[in-house]
Amino acid sequence: MSRHGATVRWERGEAAFVDARYSREHRWRFDGGAEITASASPDVVPVPFSDPAAVDPEEAFVALSSCHMLWWLHLAARRRLVVNRYEDRAEGVMGERDGRVRMLRVTLRPQVELAGEDTAAIALADQLHHAAHEACFLANSVSCEIVCEPATTIGASTTAHPQAAGQNAL
């Protein structure tokens, strides 16, 4: 078992508070020392009571794509794939289900650039996305659907994969 910590700190400042006209901006401090400015999403709390430049909890949730990436890179290295670049523009969709607003789906869109000229490596890269999803601690911890739509390049040519066109949940 491992433990992971974060400190979330908010201060009222000069706001009256009871009129609900207070800033939702706050700080996240992680056990490694990194600090991030956080806020409620402007989709939930209007500006100026939220900060659109800050990370909101919904965005942080979508960043679970980092866990997928780290597992994928680990698996790729074990399979001797040389990876030049990995970028994921993940997106979460909030909505109502069972009378509650929740994250309904997170779509991962990893764009991977492999070194070399072996186009057969593209199929292996796709298989590794499924394996990474199965291993990802965070994906195994949430109840929303997680969809992966990878695109892999070798050198300068891009190959989109069949599952990118549909919504195949992992």
Image (cartoon, rainbow, N blue to C red):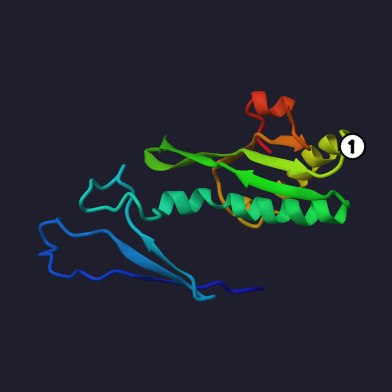
Task: List x then y, in percent, for residue 10.
Answer: 29, 69
Task: List x then y, in percent, for residue 60.
Answer: 47, 54
Observer-nearest residue: 23 or 137? 23
At 55% across and 42% down in the image, what residue appears? Answer: 90
Q: Secondary structure at mark 1?
A: loop
Observer-nearest residue: 13 or 3? 13
Task: List x then y, in percent, for residue 77.
Answer: 82, 55
Q: Is residue 111 left or right of residue 78?
A: left
Observer-nearest residue: 37 or 82? 82
Q: Quadrant of the N terminus?
A: bottom right
The answer to whether 8 is drawn above or below residue 22 in the figure is below
Q: Is residue 100 left or right of residue 160?
A: left
Query: Identity of the amino acid at label 1?
Result: Asp
The answer to whether 3 is drawn above or below residue 115 in the figure is below
Q: Quadrant of the C terminus?
A: top right
Q: Which residue is mark 1?
A: 118
At 32% across and 53% down in the image, what residue appears? Answer: 40
